[in-house]
Image (cartoon, grey):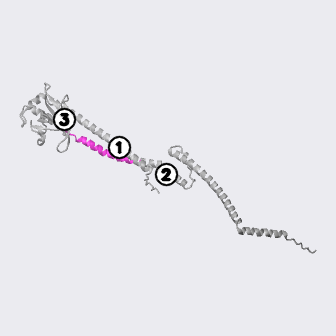
């Protein structure tokens, strides 16, 4: 005897819910990834344009020949020079306008080593300021190379803050590169945009997910209802009940696969019902024939018995005697 295979029943409604939920989740993940990347790129591009404009504005207040004069002063003490005070005032003015940005001027030594010339923090925040003409190694930063005179470098400082460093070359009247203007900007706004997107997108996702699941749930109920009805009717037919009217599926003004299936069932049930009636009639006729044959056989068995033969002989003898005995007529008195 074969062991019946174990099966798992999963309703059509559950299948629809799982399928649509999976499809919606994948679609949302793709849209979220695209939107997150797009928004981050837009915010970064706006930040870079702002820094480039800021560098261009800073460069307007820095004269290349005057800057070259400052590079000849010894490192350490700030020089008592009107040129130095002029450039420092310009850098301080820009920093006052936007506290998130710090502009400074540097003399390029080699690779990632720079001598800081101008620094606005020397007046407003000496604790975090650089020393005049001291050499600093800034491995994360990149000086513009080739035909470009501006370069932007995103990096993180020791505290983990996201920063963007920009550089623009300084040229003298002879078109010779004598230094560079640097600007450091806190790019937290890009992170804020990214975080805001994450927070808002999850709210949108949850709301959209609830709406989508609700729509799929009620839609699946409409789709599964006629199938459940057809299943119940087919179960009753299997038990010999043909009273259900399958023709209702055919009369629907909006036809679909379920309507066609219902029509096929209606035709099938009609054929089965008709054949069952014919079979019942044939069985009834066969029963009558069997009863007649059985009766004839029983009569034959009775006739063939000795008792019946003896009884038959006695009956024949009695009939013979009756024919031989004369009938005596008794006269009646008048």
Residue 164 sits in quarter: top left
Tell me where residue 323 appears, x and y as whole percent. 84, 68
Q: Earlier in the sequence, mark 2 or mark 1?
A: 1
Instruction: Sort mark 1 into few (<14), some (14-19) or many (20+) by Cα contacts within 10 Å.
Output: some
The residue wearing badge 1 is 28
Q: Nearer the viewer, mark 2 or mark 1?
A: 2
Question: Where are the magenta residues, as a range?
Answer: 185-214
Q: Which residue is mark 2?
A: 228
Residue 67 in view, yes or no: yes
The residue shown at (25%, 40%) is: 190
* N-term-proximal mark, 1 vs 3: 1
Quick check: 210 left or right of 75? right
Tell me, yes or no, whether the highlighted magenta stretch contains residue 64.
no
Q: SS of the residue at dot 3?
A: strand
**Which image quadrant for residue 146?**
top left
Mark 2 or 3, which is nearer the eye?
2
According to the picture, the residue beneath numbered tag 3 turns out to be 166
Sort mark 2 into few (<14), some (14-19) or many (20+) by Cα contacts within 10 Å.
some
């Amino acid at each position: 005897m074969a062991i019946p295979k174990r099966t798992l029943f999963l309703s059509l409604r559950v299948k629809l819910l799982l399928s649509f939920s999976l499809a919606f989740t994948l679609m949302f993940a793709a849209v979220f990834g695209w939107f997150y990347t797009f928004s981050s790129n837009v915010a970064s591009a706006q930040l870079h344009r702002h820094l480039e404009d800021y560098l261009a504005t800073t460069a307007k207040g820095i004269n290349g020949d005057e800057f070259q004069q400052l590079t000849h002063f010894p490192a350490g003490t700030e020089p008592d020079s009107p040129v130095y005070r002029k450039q420092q005032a310009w850098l301080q003015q820009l920093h006052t306008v936007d506290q998130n940005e710090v502009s400074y001027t540097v003399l390029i030594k080699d690779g990632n080593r720079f001598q800081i010339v101008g620094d606005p923090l020397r007046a407003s925040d000496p604790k975090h300021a650089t020393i005049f003409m001291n050499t600093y190694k800034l491995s994360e930063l990149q000086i513009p190379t080739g035909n470009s005179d501006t370069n932007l470098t995103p990096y993180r400082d020791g505290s983990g803050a996201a920063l963007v460093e920009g550089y623009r070359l300084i040229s003298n009247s002879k078109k010779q590169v004598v230094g560079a203007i640097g600007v450091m900007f806190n790019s937290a706004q890009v992170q804020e945009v990214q975080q805001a997107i994450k927070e808002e997108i999850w709210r949108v996702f949850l709301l959209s997910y609830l709406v989508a699941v609700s729509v799929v749930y009620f839609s699946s109920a409409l789709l599964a209802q006629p199938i459940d009805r057809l299943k119940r009717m087919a179960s009753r037919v299997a038990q010999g009940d043909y009273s259900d009217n399958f023709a209702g599926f055919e009369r629907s003004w909006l036809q679909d696969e379920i309507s066609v299936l219902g029509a096929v069932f209606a035709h099938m049930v009609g054929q089965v019902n008709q054949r069952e009636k014919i079979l019942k009639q044939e069985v009834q006729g066969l029963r009558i024939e069997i009863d007649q044959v059985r009766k004839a056989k029983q009569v034959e068995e009775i006739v063939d018995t000795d008792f019946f033969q003896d009884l038959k002989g006695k009956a024949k003898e009695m009939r013979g005697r009756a024919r031989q005995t004369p009938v005596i007529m008794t006269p009646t008195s008048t």
